[in-house]
């Protein structure tokens, strides 16, 4: 799969720009603040519906403009797609408008557009993934699954709502000292049903990621010349319940609910469910964040992304588009080359670098180079 054209109107620093993207690797090169990340951010938005750094559409619309537009043309094995997103930034005091999605020119719901373009992305923020609060890692897994499985998208949203409702009920009960048993029983059933299915999907995903992850970490480790033995790095899903079927998980969650019954009522919050789970990366049995260097964190997260790409490829039937923002600058030369080698031939990779010198030989020799300067790009 590849992006053939990216077109922006009043998006971030761009008033208007259209970029034709070739097969293979494209490197966006330009000074700090030139607008390189903005380009990858736009593609990420079209693929996954969110930005790694903006929490509000008003940040994405060019300052002074009221609407912004991102248009991405995608070539997939099964044909061509055009994804468009309209973003609104109404002037102060005016009503906010939700963004609009179009697929091949027709208005669609966000859910119908998600997954039309599949990407694996590395942004500078991702280095902190393993050291961040567990919620970030759960969101990471859910975002990966949501690109592929519509049901996961729907169920994680429902689960969120069930937990909110149940928490409100438990909180109210704690204050008023009464709890409608019928009502809580209804939310318990919903919680069990959704928790079983969401946690099973996540656990299976991590199991499927693990071999490729171990392989990638070994490759990154072998690429360095240091003599320290490569640590036995592994990734597991740390779940409250185990089990290979929905039914087994459901009954385990039921048991856990009984066990935590008093504690939940006393604390006024839902203690059972996959919102308490985590993705754990360990080295020789120890949690990585506790001792790894920043470069090691970066390598571990990159290995995770390499595994993610392999997983997405197996699900989609063709490699995702790689978005690699400023990924090379902090890697030693061995790891840079290892990363370049991990991108499958035939996959499209879009990456950014502040200077040409920052590009590994393997990439510099074959990549299409696009110079980015404030508000514009220059194509060869
Ligand atoms: N909504 C906006 N409207 C106009 N300009 C914006 C908007 N949001 C960000 N910018 C500008 O975009 C520029 C940042 O672009 P970007 O993050 O893509 O730079 P970069 O090339 O990736 O830089 P670096 O090499 O430092 O990562 C900044 O100059 C910033 O002022
Ligand atoms: Mg940047």
Image: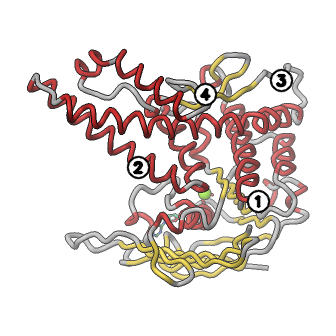
- Residue identifier under label 4: 280
Could you say which is closer to the camera, residue 268 or residue 294?
A: 268
Residue 115 as seen in the image, left or right of residue 336: left
Residue 136 as seen in the image, left or right of residue 318: left
- Residue identifier under label 2: 157
Q: Earlier in the sequence, mark 3 or mark 2?
A: 2
* Structural distance between the alpha carbons of marks 1 and 3: 32 Å
User: Residue visible at 43% across and 71% down?
Assistant: 61
* Structural distance between the alpha carbons of marks 2 and 4: 23 Å
Label 3 within 8 A of ligand 2 by Cβ = no
Q: Residue furthest left?
A: 176
Q: Secondary structure at mark 4?
A: strand
Tell me residue 216's x, y (percent). Answer: 80, 38
Image quadrant where residue 137 sits: top right
Tell me residue 328's x, y (percent). Answer: 75, 49
Q: Secondary structure at mark 2?
A: helix
Q: Secondary structure at mark 3?
A: loop
Quadrant placement of the C terminus: bottom right
Q: Earlier in the sequence, mark 2 or mark 4?
A: 2
Q: Check residue 317 in the rendering and tell me which mark sits there, or answer none.
A: 1
Classed neighbour count for the residue bearing mark 1: other residues with Cα under 10 Å, few (<14), some (14–19), many (≥20): few
Classed neighbour count for the residue bearing mark 2: other residues with Cα under 10 Å, few (<14), some (14–19), many (≥20): few
Q: Check residue 230 in the rendering and tell me which mark sits there, or answer none.
A: 3
Q: Earlier in the sequence, mark 1 or mark 2?
A: 2
Mark nearer the viewer, 3 or 2: 2
Could you say which is closer to the camera, residue 304 or residue 311?
A: 311
């Amino acid at each position: 799969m590849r992006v053939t054209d990216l077109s922006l109107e009043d998006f971030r620093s761009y008033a208007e720009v259209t970029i034709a993207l070739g097969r293979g690797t494209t490197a966006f090169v330009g000074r700090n603040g030139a607008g390189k990340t903005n380009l990858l951010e736009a593609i990420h938005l079209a693929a996954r519906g969110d930005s790694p750094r903006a929490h509000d559409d008003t940040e994405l619309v060019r300052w002074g403009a009221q609407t912004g537009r991102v248009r991405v043309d995608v070539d997939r094995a099964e044909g061509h797609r055009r994804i468009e997103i309209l973003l609104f930034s109404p002037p102060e005091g005016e009503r906010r408008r939700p963004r609009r999605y179009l697929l091949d020119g027709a208005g669609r719901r966000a859910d119908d557009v998600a997954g039309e373009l599949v990407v694996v992305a590395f942004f500078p923020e991702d280095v902190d993934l393993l050291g961040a609060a567990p919620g970030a890692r759960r969101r990471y897994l859910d975002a990966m699954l949501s690109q592929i499985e519509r049901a996961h998208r729907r169920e994680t949203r429902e689960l969120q709502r069930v937990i909110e409702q149940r928490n409100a009920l438990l909180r109210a009960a704690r204050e008023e000292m009464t709890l409608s048993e019928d009502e809580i029983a209804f939310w318990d059933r919903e919680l069990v049903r959704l928790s079983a299915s969401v946690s099973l999907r996540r656990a299976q995903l991590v199991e499927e990621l693990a071999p490729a992850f171990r392989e990638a970490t070994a490759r990154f480790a072998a690429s360095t010349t240091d003599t320290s033995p490569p640590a036995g790095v592994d990734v597991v899903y740390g779940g409250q319940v185990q089990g290979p079927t929905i039914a087994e998980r459901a009954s385990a969650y039921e048991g856990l609910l009984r066990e935590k019954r008093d504690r939940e009522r006393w604390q006024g919050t839902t203690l059972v469910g996959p919102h308490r789970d985590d993705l754990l990366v360990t080295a020789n049995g120890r949690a990585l964040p506790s001792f790894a260097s920043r470069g090691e964190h970066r390598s571990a997260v990159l290995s995770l992304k390499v595994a993610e790409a392999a997983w997405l490829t197996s699900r989609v039937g063709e490699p995702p588009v790689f978005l690699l923002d400023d990924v090379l600058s902090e890697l030693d030369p061995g790891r840079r080359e290892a990363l370049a080698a991990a991108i499958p031939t035939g996959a499209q990779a879009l990456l950014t670098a502040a200077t040409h010198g920052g590009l590994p030989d393997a990439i510099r020799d074959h990549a299409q180079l696009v110079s980015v300067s404030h508000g514009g790009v220059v194509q060869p």
